[in-house]
Amino acid sequence: MQIRWNIFFAVGMACLSSVANGEIIYYTDLFNPPTQIIFENNHVTAFDLLSPLKRCAVKSKFICFNANGLKFAIPKNPAEQQRWSYDGVTYTRKKMQKMGVLGQEVTVYFIQQQGKNGTLEFIYSMERGLLAFGGVFEKPKFFFLENDCGFGSPSDCNLKARQDGASQRRHP
């Protein structure tokens, strides 16, 4: 069973991500709350496991991460490429469309990742970063951004989000 993105409404580029600026980024599994994946500084917490967070170099042509096999990569200019490979994984831009995300109209990229561990789906915007990702394992998982800005968002994303009137969710 593949996750169908048209079922979901995804609410919620510079080389730096919000994580690089010290912000903690929360993604919560909509199918299995309160399961979360948390990006913080140089590590990711997923399923109670702490893993080192490896990012692309600033001079790379990609925005990417690898955290214990959870990988994501997108070209810094994704509108120009339909398909790309990075670190042994192939990605395909399935769809690109404008939509409202947290009160801001942005271009959203729907990306499919084909790797040796199966298929994952990602939703990304240049303005807000990684918005959501998921796939089907023993049961479906769909992790959705709780913050105003996700991994790979521009360094000024939170400032712009506040100016746009979006509110940051606070975690204890």
Image (cartoon, helix red, strand yellow):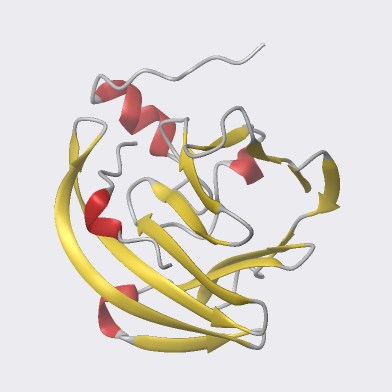
Q: Name above or below for residue 28 compared with residue 114.
A: above
At 79% from the left edge and 63% from the top edge, which residue is drawn? 68
Q: Residue at x 56, y 36 (%)?
A: 32
Left or right of 85? Residue 131 is left
- Image position of 38 (left or right of 110): right
- Residue 74: x and y in percent read 46, 72
Residue at the spot 39% in from the left edge and 61% down from the top edge:
3
* Position above or below: 45 against 165: below
In terms of depth relative to the viewer, which is nearer, 86 or 6? 6
Q: Position of residue 38 (x, y in %)?
A: 67, 38
Placement of the N terminus among the 4 image quadrants: bottom left
Q: Is residue 3 left or right of residue 79?
A: right
Percent of width and height locating residue 114: 52, 82
Q: Quadrant of residue 116?
A: bottom right
Q: Nearer the viewer, residue 81 or 37?
A: 37
Left or right of 58: which side holds 84? Answer: left
